[in-house]
Image (cartoon, rainbow, N blue to C red):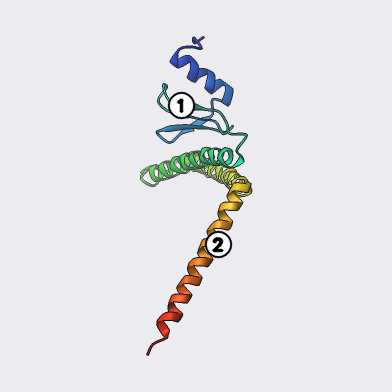
Amino acid sequence: MNDPYSVAGRVDDFDKRHGRDSVSNGQWVFYKSGAVREVDPLGALIEPRLDDAYEHAKNVLQYYQLKLRRAVQAFDAFRSQLLMSTVPDRDSVEELKRLKSVVEEKSAEHEAAKQRLAETPEAIRRAESKQFDQQMKQELESFKQDVKSVRV
């Protein structure tokens, strides 16, 4: 058992609280719970932002994006390996189908997490703001075209 006051102990304790099923982007480690920690064991340990639905959903989405990316990479690598094979192996085709189903499962989880993020009040506010900005840009462009069309 790790000393809870050691560097390894604090990371181990964090991992236990948030589940061992984590995924890293090289700088940060993301957990299904929405928790995040730096890869550097001396770095930040960030508990899930349950008080901020947008930030929490954003971290959960990042977890699922990375899980999906890994599944796609595993599928692509195995498929490429099979395409270069000189000996047919039917069991490998079954494995490729299994990897495909993993990608489909991760894709569905990713889409669900994306939808949960989009439904947060902050994401709705941002989408409305973006839409307003686009409308204003279109109106300004239309105005400029009208001005340019008036000549002497």
Residue 14, compared with residue 100, is above or below; it is above
- Point 53% across, 18% down: residue: 13
Q: What type is the residue that disc 2 sits on?
A: Phe
Q: Mark 1 points at which residue?
A: 44
**CA separation, marks 1 and 2?**
37 Å
The image position of residue 101, as x and y in percent, is 56, 43
Q: Mark 2 points at which residue?
A: 132
* Residue nearer the viewer, 11 or 85: 11
- Point 53% across, 66% down: residue: 135
- Point 42% across, 84% down: residue: 149
Q: Residues within 10 Å of mark 2 (few under 14, many from 20)?
A: few
The image position of residue 66, as x and y in percent, is 48, 39
Looking at the rendered structure, the secondary structure element under dot 1 is loop
Given contact means CB atoms under 8 Å apart, are the residues at marks 1 and 2 in contact? no
Q: Which label lies toward us, 1 or 2?
A: 2
Side (left or right) of 45 relative to 40: right
The image position of residue 143, as x and y in percent, is 47, 76
| Residue 55 position by quadrant | top right
Number of numbered discs visible in the structure rendering: 2
What is the quadrant of the C terminus in the image?
Answer: bottom left
Side (left or right) of 39 relative to 65: left
Q: What type is the residue that disc 1 sits on?
A: Ala
Q: Which residue lies furthest to the bottom in this view?
A: 152
Looking at the rendered structure, the secondary structure element under dot 2 is helix
- Point 45% across, 16% down: residue: 8
* Residue nearer the viewer, 126 or 78: 126
Q: Residues within 10 Å of mark 1 (few under 14, many from 20)?
A: few
